[in-house]
Image (tube, rainbow, N blue to C red):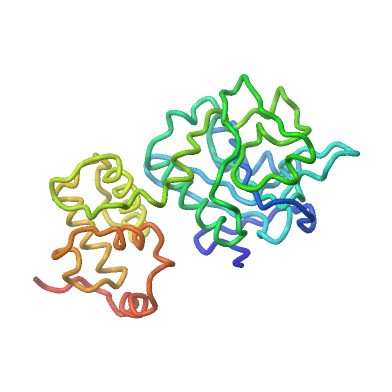
Amino acid sequence: MKNWHPNANKLVGNHAGKQVEGGRKLVWHTTEGFSAEDAISAYRANNGWPHFTLEYKNGRQRLFQHVPLSLAARSLEHPGGTPETNKANVIQVELVGFAKDTPSWSAGQYAAIAELARWIERNFKVPRTCGVTFVPVDHERRMSGEGFVDYSGHCGHQHVANQNVFHHTDPGDLRIELVLGGSTYASRALSPGDSGDDVREFQAHLDKRLHARHLPEIAESGSYDPPTDGATKLVTFYLGFPLDVVARHGATPRVQRFIRNPDLRPQLYLVRARKRKELPVP
């Protein structure tokens, strides 16, 4: 198990001790604010640190990790005499934004959430399942204390036992189907002329890789146009792919998977990438 996400900004906060018992679960929160900085100020003021804070704005994401996976976070209420909610084998993620807005978040934002979910699932053994229903901000679907401890999979703050029902109905009507299905969208090879939500989501991941190299980003139009084709060739070159793989086969599901998460690349690709400094002359 990796305790720290390799691509997260490490901003360490207070933890609640060791995880104690229960099914492996992931709880989604919304910060009810406009920025990661606002959220982090609130954590400090209230000593209520989550494991992660994820901010997504204008096609760019910032990920912060505050607590290692092996320790419990502090974002849940835990009244005396009730199960210790924070320690019930739960990973907690704060999504920057408002619960009322989660149904209208972009495909790119949900792709970023899904990408983080896959990493947490792999490293904390959280099942990629959801046995609860996410509802709007004026509703709540609480589990019992024992039910929450035993629960496995994804849920929201609105589902956690013994929380303030007036303040903790986040993350609202989160589109959990996009979170759970986010890393399986790459079911076809993409090439010039293709269009759809899968193209738009792929473009969002291309922009992350371009931004990381201080290169011009492309429009997330949902159309696999010449700029998208050129960006795919550029990014795969810098990730260590063979020079002709995209030209011959397009953006295959394998190519898309490695662009979403370069940590999954074979060692050969990583070694080749480290040697590549300039684009080859055509």
Q: Which residue does the image show at 55% across and 40% down from the upper left?
A: 95
Identify which residue, 100 or 234, lies in the foreground.
Answer: 100
Q: Give the answer, above or below, for where 275 lies relative to 4.
A: below
Q: Which residue does the image show at 50% across and 60% down from the upper left?
A: 7
Identify which residue, 41 or 247, lies in the foreground.
Answer: 247
Q: Give the answer, above or below, for where 62 lies relative to 124.
A: above
**Residue 49: x, y in percent?**
70, 47
Query: Residue most toward the top?
Result: 138
**Residue 102: x, y in percent?**
49, 31
Q: Which residue does the image show at 75% across and 54% down from the upper left?
A: 15
Q: Which residue does the image show at 31% across and 49% down from the upper left?
A: 202
Q: Is residue 194 left or right of residue 7?
A: left
Query: Residue most toward the left?
Result: 282
Tell me which corner region of the image, top left, top right, bottom left or bottom right, holds residue 230.
bottom left
Q: Quadrant of the N terminus?
A: bottom right
Q: Number of labelled discs? A: 0
Q: Quadrant of the C terminus?
A: bottom left
Tell me which corner region of the image, top left, top right, bottom left or bottom right, holds residue 265.
bottom left
**Residue 181: x, y in percent?**
43, 46
Identify which residue, 49 or 113, lies in the foreground.
Answer: 113
Q: Is residue 141 left or right of residue 189?
A: right
Tell me which corner region of the image, top left, top right, bottom left or bottom right, holds residue 75.
top right
